[in-house]
Structures are given as structure tokens and as C-alpha cells.
Image: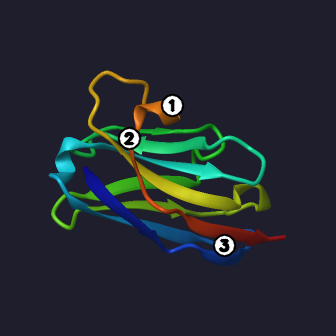
Amino acid sequence: QVQLIESGGGLVQAGGSLRLSCAASGRTFTMYIMGWFRQTPGKEREFVAAITRIGSTTWYADSAKGRFTISRDNVKNTLYLQMNSLKPEDAGVYYCAASAQRGANRVEVSTYDNWGQGTQVTVSS
């Protein structure tokens, strides 16, 4: 198991930026594909972005493309999500997630078996 702790959420005005971090501990960080998901009240947790074990490839939800950047530092065992040009619809609880599965669909919640506790992002209009 890997333990995940998110930070960096907060209140920001529309058009602003936030950088989320996810610190990992426990098992070897590079064993895991990492992802960010967002959840709002009454809705399913939804995919935002994912990154391969060595950071060579990234994937984004259409809503995040061009505005968000996922990255990882495998020396610091930390995952990041840089969010720019934030919109009110980007608000929610952001979770980082880790998956040791190979060949699984990286946009699916069920692919990930390790989750952080979440960090709240609020975007005012």
C-alpha cells in the first residue's frame, strides 16, 4: 500500500491558479501510475488527469486540457497538479490516486486502489 496526502487546495477567484500536491509514502512511488480526480456533491468522482510511472506520458479530461498540468517528482515522491485559468466549474474535492495495475484504463476510478483524503478547491466567480 502507498499512503497519499494531498495539499494545496483553497479559495481562488475565477481566472486564478492553484497548485495541488500529493505526497506519497510507503511502497516505491515509481510502482504506481498516478491520477487526479474531482468530486462535487451528489456527483460521481470524475477523472481529471493521469501520468505514467516515469512521467513520460500524461492524459487529461477534456475539461482540463490546456489549463491543467500533471507532473511528478520521483525523487520527492510527490505528484502535482498545476491548475491555471480556473473556472467555477473546476471546484470540488480533488483526490490523488495510485494504481499498480498494468494495462488498466487510467481514467476509471476502479483502476485505482490507493486514495488520498482529498483537498477542497473553491473557485469564486
Q: Earlier in the sequence, mark 2 or mark 3?
A: 3
Q: Which residue position is annotated with label 3?
A: 16
Q: Secondary structure at mark 1?
A: loop
* Secondary structure category for the residue under label 2: loop
Q: Residue at x 42, y 42 (%)?
A: 50
- Please state the horizontal and vertical placement of residue 118, each as a whole percent of the image: 53, 62
Q: Pointer 2: what residue?
A: 113
Q: Amino acid at mark 2?
A: Asp
Task: Using the image, determine if residue 122 lies above or below residue 114.
Answer: below
Q: Amino acid at mark 3?
A: Gly
| Residue 56 to residue 83: above or below | above
The residue at the point 62 percent across, 44 percent down is 45
The CA distance from mark 3 to mark 1 is: 28 Å
Image point (61%, 51%), residue name: 38
Question: Mark 1 — residue?
Answer: 108
The kind of residue on which mark 1 rests is: Glu
Quarter of the image for the C terminus: give it: bottom right
Query: Are there few (<14), some (14-19), or many (20+) residues within 10 Å of tag 2?
Result: few
Q: Does 20 appear above or below 38? A: below
Specify few, some or many for label 1: CA neighbours under 10 Å numbering under 14, 14-19, or 20 or more: few
Q: In the depicted view, which residue is nearer to us: 23 or 72? A: 23
Tell me, yes or no, whether the two marked residues, 2 and 1, touch with CB atoms within 8 Å: no
Q: Which one is in front in this view, the residue at disc 2 or the one at disc 1?
A: 2
- For image coordinates 50% across by 74% down, the residue present is 8
Camera sees residue 107: no
Is 88 in front, or is 26? 26
In the current view of this chain or complex, which residue is farthest to the front? 1
